[in-house]
Amino acid sequence: MEKNPVRAHGGGAEEVCGRPGGGGKGGLRVFFLDESGFGLSLPPTYAWAGRGETVRVPRAWGKAGRVNAVAHLERLSWGGWGMGYTLLEGRCGTGEVVAYLEGLSREGVRGVVFLDNAPFHRSRAFGEAAGAGAHGGLPAAVQPPSEPCGEHLAAGEGVFDAPAALRGRGGAEGGGGRCHGAAQRTDGAGGVAKSMHEHLRPMQTLLQRAWEVAREGVLIHEEGRVVYLNPVAAELLEVEPDKVVGRSLLLALRDHKLEAVARRGGEATLETRNRTLWVKAAPGVLLLWDRTEEKNRLEALEESSRVLAHEFRTPVAGMLSLLEALQGGLHRAQAQEALQMLYQETQRLRRLLEDLPLNRRPLQNRTFVLEELQNRLERFLAPQLAQKSAWIRWQMPHTVWANPDAVYQALLNLLDNAIKYGTGSEIVVISGQNKDGVWLEVRNQGQPLTDFEHLFKAGQRGMHAANVRGTGLGLALVRRLAAGWGGTAYGRALENGNAFGLTFPICSGAAPQLSDNTRHSIT
Amino acid sequence: MREVLDRELNQLTEETIRMISLVREMVEKSARALSEQDPHLAQEVIAQDAQVDAMELDIESKTIAIMARQALVASDLRFAFTIIKALTDLERAGDYAAHVAEDVILLAKEPPLKNYVTLPDMGRRLTHMLDLVSKAIAERDLEAARGVFRRDDEINALYEEVSRELLTYMMEDPRTITKALALGRVARSYERLGDHLENISERIVYWLTGKMEKKPEDVF
């Protein structure tokens, strides 16, 4: 080897064409290896070409008027062909071929190398140097003369021509580099390619079967053209395989960002075809996963977070006001009252936490008089009411069967809205009864609204809310809470204002009843 | 000779698909910028408009060169004309996406009038229409082209709905007029964008069938 050093092994191949010698690492692979020479009688423009590159063969190389090369053909994991080679300064003999094998081995490539059964490969010297494991590198085996391609044209003989020959067979199995310099070897190349194809058919069939049932999309491309895509990829990309195989990558992907990832490699999450796709690209391979559902779940989770934040924001703000009042100094009786309220609110928040998730039906239903909630609500909302110079007129003498905390939370949201968006000073909280059960309304003054239903959808806000901070979640939550005790939430326009109400159906728990003789009906 | 022509026409197809994809990205971003009130994203959309304009000129000159060099006939000739016409519509589509982005920048300066649902939905539907246009060209898919007509009707219906809703807002509270007008312009831009995609689809149908198909209401 010292006499005849390998000029460019592996990475050197990139200078001319094809893949770096040896391909990837790991896994048991099958290689075909051969040597070849180029006479300097070739015209000056004679070149090797691969992947769009054309590089002149340097004529100054070689003893005895030849440029010698060793190359191997490798079946890649996705089914295409890869070619590695090295150019030699000088002769090509046993030492050079063995050095090439060792070079592959040093790169971590594991596999079996097949050589044709030309006399050179069957010589004793070569056998000793390149026999299985003897050289410490890749085990090499000489193919028997019974190979279908004949004694001197076994599969390994076609290293230089096979990729081009395969490409001519429809492109799906094409790959690797090609070398026009081996034109003298084209005789029987088609047969050689066929032979190799037969050798590797079982593995390819298995791989293809696996891809056909894979849950991710698999798209194989070569030289900017689609050579294969599995059913999932066709579905995700909304393409018909027959119409895109053999055509350019962009025509199949129809998305410049996706194409860029496929060509450049790496990973990305992209929106295309109304889907969220996570894609991973390696040379020649594009893998696609549909992450639409995952994204939707994430959005639902975010909405839940917003709901929770909303649920806690109002009570926490109230508690903060009480704490500030305490900090500012209160009379003993007032301080006692504030502490009592803080205690009650903390207890309520604890129960709220225990009731998570929010859409679970509350289990704490009991019969209670709505008036029970009045004092807590009024005191809790006192700072807000004072700020707007507003007050609440209470008329809710009915008894209902529900979770008091849920009713409190619903009323708190309705009153919060009434204070924020109402234009008058008086807010009325009033309950009544009809044949279906008890109703409870919060009425405020202001311009009557026209469409109430859309306000109960999460994220929707009324026109008067345009300049007020809010999330548009409050009424959606009120409706959800009401559903928890079997009732509902509604809105209706009044002559000079709006009413938002809750219903409490008659149920087996306890019949609704009045604590006095006051009766109202929804008109 | 035919091989050379096929290669050139394929390149033309690819470049047109790339342009459609870029416009699609602009529309998708404009809708996202609106729903997320993101002026930076809107700025990206405006910047991309120059790319679309450059692509229009480039593809147009290439198409003219092919038409001058090759004696195009039948479907090849119709294809070349389809591309020439589609380029103008695509360029306008890009302009409308940029107009939406400009309005988003204005709207993002103040609290939203409401939670925007319908307008981003219009944007999403338009991206799907662009997907269909792309498929129709790449796969010569007549059904995909006709699918665009149906979706444009949906866009028009949404535009009417948004316009009515905005009018209600303005009538009920004059303080909302500025925002409502900006939102009205967004809806109008999306509606016009849909019309341009419909024009492209009509040309694709002509290319593939040799016959012009127009919706009954478009025939005068």
Image (cartoon, rainbow, N blue to C red):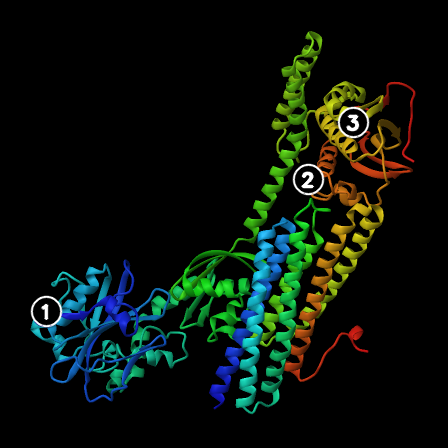
Q: Is A497 left or right of B120, judged from the image as shown?
A: right
Q: Residues within 10 Å of mark 2 (few under 14, many from 20)?
A: some
Quickly name the residue at label 1.
A1
Q: Is A400 left or right of B15, judged from the image as shown?
A: right
Instruction: Give percent across and percent down for residue B14.
Output: 52, 74
Question: Mark 3 — on which chain does it sit?
Answer: A
Q: Residue at 64% across / 62% down in the picture?
A: B97
Quickly name the residue at label 2.
A471
Query: Image height check: is A289 above or below B143?
Result: above
Q: Is B140 left or right of A125, judged from the image as shown?
A: right
- Secondary structure of the residue carrying tag 3 is loop
Tag 2 and tag 1, C-beta contact below 8 Å: no
Quickly name the residue at label 3.
A508
Specify which label sits upstream in the sequence, 2 or 3. 2
Mark 1 belongs to which amino acid?
Met
Mark 3 belongs to which amino acid?
Ser
Instruction: Give percent across and percent down for residue A132.
Output: 15, 64
Instruction: Tell which tag, 2 or 3, sits nearer the viewer.
Output: 2
Instruction: Give percent across and percent down for residue A102.
Output: 17, 64
Q: Where, by quadrant of the figure, is residue A162 drawn? A: bottom left
Res. B148 mark = none
- Nearer to us in this view, A475 or A14: A14
Outermost residue, top direction? Answer: A332
